[in-house]
């Protein structure tokens, strides 16, 4: 059977340097900076590879994958960028059955990385102290079709938590060192931990707290990504790069000291 778009599906509109994810619900799809739009109902019955015109630009119609969903997030607070998020997924050794506790959902950028890694049989429990942040995350998770694997909770990870026997914990919260003892009680023996940290002062406090709380293999690091500009006879690193974004601290829980 041919792959065709149905009512309620999400579709990716792609052209050079621009992309947009739309829901095929009869609404008008508009691209920022372009005049005009297109009724999403027109795309029902079309197939990936077909083309749609908005203003004076032609867009390729595709099914969005997880990278498209992350790059087209509904934004709110600052996200953990992909170079760090992908290292977090690796450092936590996530698999398709992992149970993950996330402290600090933001707008769901890292949440989607985690959900994609634990799909289809895992679960991500995201805590945030702000309801508006959880609402943005819930919207982005729903659009990516991963809601069945996600639970959002208003709460502070330095307080009482309902989860236990977690395979992994990741924190993107102020003063993560205050949550180390609490989240340790949610981890299984051998479970993995990561904190995303903006300053070296916090880095030191987290590392020392982990060493005191029964964690081993404590590893602080940062990721530098260096893209290249490729032109015939003039290939070189780009002039401006995104250098420091944050520090990562990984550790493994081996039991209370």
Image: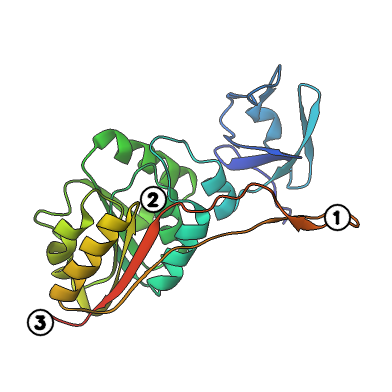
Residue 102 visible from this viewpoint: no
Whether pointer 2 and pointer 1 mark residues with C-beta atoms closer than 8 Å, the reply is no
Relative side of 166 to 140, left or right: left
| Residue 94, picture quadrant | bottom left
Q: Secondary structure at mark 3?
A: loop
Residue 186 location, x and y as percent? 17, 68
Residue at the outermost right position? 233
Earlier along the polypeptide chain: callout 2 or callout 1?
2
From mark 1 to mark 3, how far is it between C-alphas?
Answer: 56 Å
Question: With respect to residue 2, does 221 lie above or below?
Answer: below
Residue 122 visible from this viewpoint: yes
Residue situated in front as seen by the camera: 184 or 247: 247
Mark 2 closeness class: few <14, some 14–19, many ≥20 residues within 10 Å: some
Numbered circle sitting on residue 257 = 3
Residue 248 location, x and y as percent? 37, 63
Name the residue tied to disc 2: 147
Residue 176 location, x and y as percent? 22, 56
Name the residue tied to disc 1: 234
């Amino acid at each position: 059977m041919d792959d065709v778009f149905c009512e309620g599906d999400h579709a990716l509109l792609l052209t050079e340097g621009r992309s947009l994810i739309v829901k095929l619900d009869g609404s008008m799809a508009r691209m920022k900076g372009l005049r005009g739009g297109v009724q999403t109902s027109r795309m029902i019955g079309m197939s990936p590879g077909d083309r749609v015109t908005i203003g004076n630009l032609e867009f390729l119609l595709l099914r969005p994958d997880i990278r498209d969903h992350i790059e087209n997030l509904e934004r709110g607070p600052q996200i953990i960028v992909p170079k760090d998020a992908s290292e977090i997924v690796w450092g936590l050794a996530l698999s398709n059955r992992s149970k993950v506790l996330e402290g600090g959902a933001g707008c769901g950028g890292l949440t989607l990385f985690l959900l994609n890694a634990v799909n289809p049989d895992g679960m991500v429990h995201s805590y945030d102290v702000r309801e508006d942040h959880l609402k943005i995350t819930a919207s982005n998770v729903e659009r990516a079709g991963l809601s069945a694997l996600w639970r959002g909770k208003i709460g502070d990870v330095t307080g009482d938590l309902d989860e236990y026997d977690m395979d992994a914990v990741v924190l993107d919260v102020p003063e993560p060192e205050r949550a180390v003892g609490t989240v340790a009680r949610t981890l299984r023996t051998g479970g993995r931990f990561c904190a995303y940290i903006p300053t070296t002062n916090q880095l030191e406090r987290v590392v020392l707290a982990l060493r005191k709380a029964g964690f081993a293999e404590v590893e602080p690091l940062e990721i530098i990504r260096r893209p290249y500009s490729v032109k015939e006879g003039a290939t070189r690193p780009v002039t401006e790069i995104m250098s420091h974004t944050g520090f990562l601290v990984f550790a493994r829980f081996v039991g209370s000291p």
